[in-house]
Image (spheres, rainbow, N blue to C red):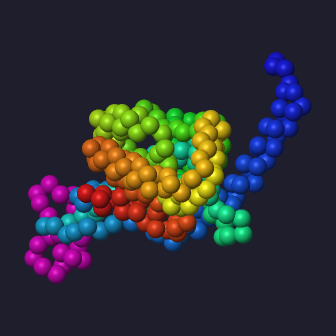
Amino acid sequence: MSDPLPDAAARDLRRAAEAEAAALPALLIAAEHLANTMQMGGHGRRRAGAGEEFWQYRPAHSGDAARFVDWRRSARSDTQFIREREAQLAQSLCLWVDPAASMRFTGAETGRKARPEKLSRARLLALALAISALRAGERVGLTSPLAPPRPGKAQLLTLAQALLAETSALDYAAPDLSAVAPQARVVVLSDFFTDPAGLETVLSGAAGRGVSGVLLQVLDPAEEEFPYDGRTVFTSMAGGLRFETREAGDLRARYRARLAERRDHLARIARQSGWAFASHHTGAPAQAALLWLHGALGGGWR
């Protein structure tokens, strides 16, 4: 039998568990509301098969079973017709929400309208997308083998709990897609402040296994506008990086240029692997980002 946890460690663990339990209902409610604003269409494949949606009538051929003949349609002509349904194949959708410390940043100023942390917005979008996909009959999971893709409503609670529990003490993180099954689709939500060379290697390997997907960069408006002037001390969320300047305003143009270069680089990396890329900031409505994700996963970027 293992030794009991020290009192301080036990209290910390209990507080963390209580905080996670308290956040879970709010996240689920918000995700359900967001998903309800955007109904994702079925992902039927345009060919005949075992599905529920009517596709087309075709003349009966020799060898067609009588049970497949649509006698009502056939009665209007001298030809017997088969009623074909559109094949609807359940697909696997894997989600990765960047758990790094940088995702906990919010630049909202005191007294102004509150903005969510980047991590909160990314979790909300991931879960709303999962709700829509599960309703469409798809299998949804995380890229981690701890939460593999599964269908059904019960999977929603598993995903929500896993998303809330996953955090990192590191400033930046990169996705690991090695456990994702071939031909699956992946959604990566991150600020992408990590080294893009590592991301390029990950996407290249995933594309080689037939894995497709989308990258959505989630930023705070302050990270785009750089509204800082005068003496400013910049510290990373995990405390590992620190930079002080007396004239922050002088850095604004160079910072914005570097951010634009990073976005161009990310878009190029995604394009080379057959993925899609877009940016979203936490000051904008979440519905716009969810709409883009739906369209991108449906192949609308091609």
Left or right relative to 183: residue 279: right
| Viewport quadrant of the N terminus | top right
Residue 271, horizontal then vertical, whole percent: 28, 48
Q: Nearer the viewer, residue 93 or 75?
A: 93
Q: Quadrant of residue 31?
A: bottom right
Q: Is residue 77 visible?
A: yes
Q: Is residue 87 above or below residue 150?
A: below
Q: Residue at x 58, y 64 (%)?
A: 32
Residue furthest out toward the front: 246
Judged by its main secondary structure, the magenta piece is: loop
Residue furthest out toward the right: 7
Q: Is residue 61 magenta?
A: yes
Q: Is residue 170 magenta?
A: no
Q: Is residue 104 visible?
A: no
Q: Is residue 120 above or below residue 173?
A: below
Left or right relative to 6: residue 23: left
Left or right relative to 177: residue 172: right
Q: Residue at x 53, y 47 (%)?
A: 97
Q: Residue at x 22, y 62 (%)?
A: 66
Left or right relative to 215: residue 5: right
Bounds of the magenta span? 60-81
Residue 153, horizontal then vertical, whole percent: 57, 55
| Viewport quadrant of the C terminus | bottom left
Residue 48, horizontal then vertical, whole percent: 24, 58
